[in-house]
Amino acid sequence: MTRVTHTIDELRSICDGFRANGHRVGLVPTMGALHPGHLSLVDAVRRTGAARVVVTIFVNPTQFGPGEDYDRYPRTLEQDLEKCRDQEVDLVYAPARDEVYPTRFQTHVEVEELTREHEGRFRSSHFRGVTTIVAKLFNAVGPCVAAFGRKDYQQWRVLERMTADLDMPVQVVGCPIVRENDGIAMSSRNRYLDAAGRERARAIIAGLRAANAAFIAGERGADRLERLARGPIESALDKIDYVVVADPVTLVRADDRCGERAVILVAAHLGTTRLIDNAVLGEDDLG
Ligand code: PAF
């Protein structure tokens, strides 16, 4: 049975009950508009041995900047609950904004270096919003394990850092990107795209595949790999925020030649929709 709560007190007391009965609790934080990528996170926490799974659904205002898509972000609670029931999720927490951020809220969690580049350069307070909400959810749920999609690659690394730095007793699992048949990374924001937009969005995976093929063939020049990925993206999308080859753990941009392990990170705009994607070169399955 999937229970649903909207209050932090009830969330805490149900999770206390799970633990009192000896169950490991797994957490899947989401902003809703659930798709198979989110559902793969539920499977991932179960695979680590979590006997009880909590999914949270909250469009977190503090991670959106002015002019971003907070107001139009898809809110599909009834369909999301149906998916959680099908997946036999034990508890869904879907709070209202005031439950999470009451009047006089003024405390934030901030990871420093790792948040400065890439997404951080274009979305200045984004990660502060993410780390704050995730820290709050960790405190309320008390999970042993929490899963995040690697589509938000930098977010995953930032949350790993936060957890380690603050000695939070939570295993952070980064799960592979789930892609549509045409290679587009699944994202709640794909709902903003019409058929023509989707077709153009495929240029991102084309760019990633081009860089990946070159890396596999032995190319280690970071500029060259970035240029190969940029090519198709530049021709099909409206604006590129970044295409960067970086160290997959520190996320420091490769100066000249990248190492034997490298991630390529992309953010680009298609009309009013901003899309991100990435690949660990030579390792991720890009279809
Ligand atoms: O990845 C997301 O959906 C969000 O950033 C998260 C982790 C649920 C925090 O609001």
Image (tube, grey):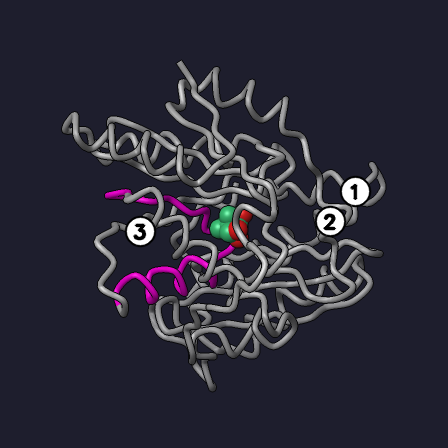
Q: Position of residue 205 (x, y in %)?
A: 62, 51
Number of labelled discs?
A: 3
Q: Of label 1 and label 3, which has the lower sequence position?
A: 3
Q: Of label 3 and label 2, which has the lower sequence position?
A: 3
Residue 151 seen = no
Q: Of label 2 and label 1, which has the lower sequence position?
A: 1
Q: Amino acid at mark 3?
A: Val
Highlighted magenta segment, given as a residue range: 143-164
Mark-to-mark CA distance, 3 and 2: 30 Å
Whether ligand 1 has any atom under 8 Å from the Cβ at mark 2 is answered as no
> For the view shown, which residue lies furthest in the left direction?
22
Q: Position of residue 77 (x, y in %)?
A: 63, 29
Q: Secondary structure at mark 3?
A: strand
Q: Looking at the rendering, which quadrant does residue 95 occupy?
A: top right
What residue is shown with label 2?
201
What residue is shown with label 3?
172
> Residue drawn 71% across and 52% down?
70
Structural crowding at the residue carrying mark 2, measured as other residues with C-alpha within 10 Å and reported as few (<14), some (14–19) or many (≥20): many
Q: Amino acid at mark 1?
A: Leu
Asked if the residue under mark 1 is in contact with the one under mark 2, i.e. CB atoms within 8 Å, the reply is: yes
What residue is shown with label 1?
193
